[in-house]
Amino acid sequence: MDKQHLESIARELVAPHKGILAADESTGTIKKRFDTIGAESTAATRIAYRESLFLAEGASQNISGVILYDETLRQDVTDGRSVTQALNDVGIIPGIKVDTGAKPLSGQDGETITEGLDGLRERCKAYYDIGARFTKWRAVYKIFDGKPSHGCIHANAHALARYAAIAQECNLVPIVEPEVLMEGDHTIEAYEAVSQWAWSEVFRQLFFAGVHLEGMLLKPNMILSGTTCPQQASVEEVAEATLRCLHRTVPSAVPGVVFLSGGQSDILATQHLNAMNQAGPQPWELSYSYGRALQAAALTTWAGDDANRPAAQAALLHRARCNGAARTGSYSAEMEAAQAAV
Ligand code: 13P
């Protein structure tokens, strides 16, 4: 493990004004997204859409890295360069999702364990050779009927830690993603209690696994009211609860926290990040690793028609700029109004 290399990539990923674009939807998930706009999902349409995102001119001002799916990492862009070469040419770091998905957790009805440890060392080495410099693994926890169980919290934390150690051994920065889902009628207090438990267990297991904290990033959910909870917390309450939970569980040695958006509207995801950064300096950089909250407007604008590519790129760049501003707490509603007027 080259600790200095890992630390410098981790810091580059959370450089000022920048965050990560998550474009690592599995083939099944991207098909679902394309279905919503009536676009066919083929290897050709998937790369056409995705290259339009990360090769949008100027994207690197607010996008430090892109998380790719296995298929994309091995594809070429339209002008014949490999995806990794094209990303390197514009100064965006290629990353790769390495888990193989959340599968039913035996013994715990309705809960999942994320798989993908078998053969992971070999896959990580191969990904490094192709050009990836960071990785992602997502664990999923659901709040329902007295769950998550201890078994689910423990098994997923253990798998995340084993993954992170293997990724670092292969000189890939691990993004450790424990996602407590927002779907459900739970209160913000319940969401906070479960997240605190899940994140504490993750850092306990990362310690046992010998993970170098300075060479990793945490990708957590924000702490919100459940989607169907009658009482919805304000932006300020979300920022306060999320910061409190991070302070209680995340060592200051970790260079950055890159939030997932998890199904929040794109504007709300930006507002929450902005509010957290307005609260003043924190021990870690607070940034984004959004999938839907960066892509939603670009996807509907593209609508499967390459004639819409420039407008889709403008939509992505606008969201990236807004989130870049949220990194310093300088995002404002006027930024949205200015774009709407274009
Ligand atoms: P969302 O921002 O759409 O939640 O996606 C982020 C991600 O990478 C989930 O694993």
Image (cartoon, rainbow, N blue to C red):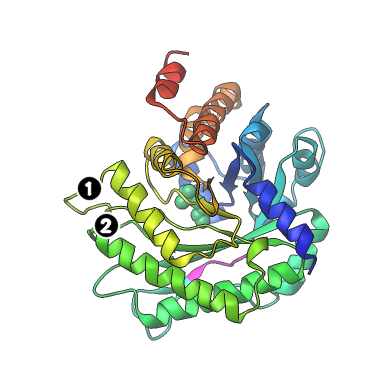
Residue 15 in which image quadrant: top right
Magenta residues, as a range? 98-102
Separation of disc 1 and disc 2 at Cα? 8 Å
**Which residue of the protein is positioned furthest toward the bottom in this rendering?**
107
**Residue type at tag 1:** Gln
- Which x, y percent locates residue 35? 45, 43
Identify the secondary structure beneath mark 2. Answer: helix
**Which residue of the protein is positioned furthest toward the top in this rendering?**
341
The residue that disc 2 covers is 188
Q: Nearer the viewer, residue 7 or 253?
A: 253
Q: Predominant secondary structure in magenta?
A: loop
For residue 87, side relative to residue 99 (left or right): right
Please say if 137 is above or below 86: below
Please say if 156 is above or below 190: below
Residue 52 in which image quadrant: top right
The residue that disc 1 covers is 232
- Which callout, 1 or 2, points at the residue further toward the start of the chain? 2
For the point 49% across and 42% down, which residue is it? 34
State the count of labels.
2
- Which x, y percent locates residue 46? 62, 43
Dot 1 crowding, Cα within 10 Å, few <14, some 14–19, many 20+: some
Identify the secondary structure beneath mark 1. Answer: loop
**Residue type at tag 2:** Ile
For residue 326, side relative to residue 230 (left or right): right
For the point 51% across and 36% down, which residue is it? 328
- Which x, y percent locates residue 25? 55, 52
For residue 74, side relative to residue 221 (left or right): right
Q: Nearer the viewer, residue 197 or 305?
A: 197
Q: Can residue 92 be seen here?
A: yes
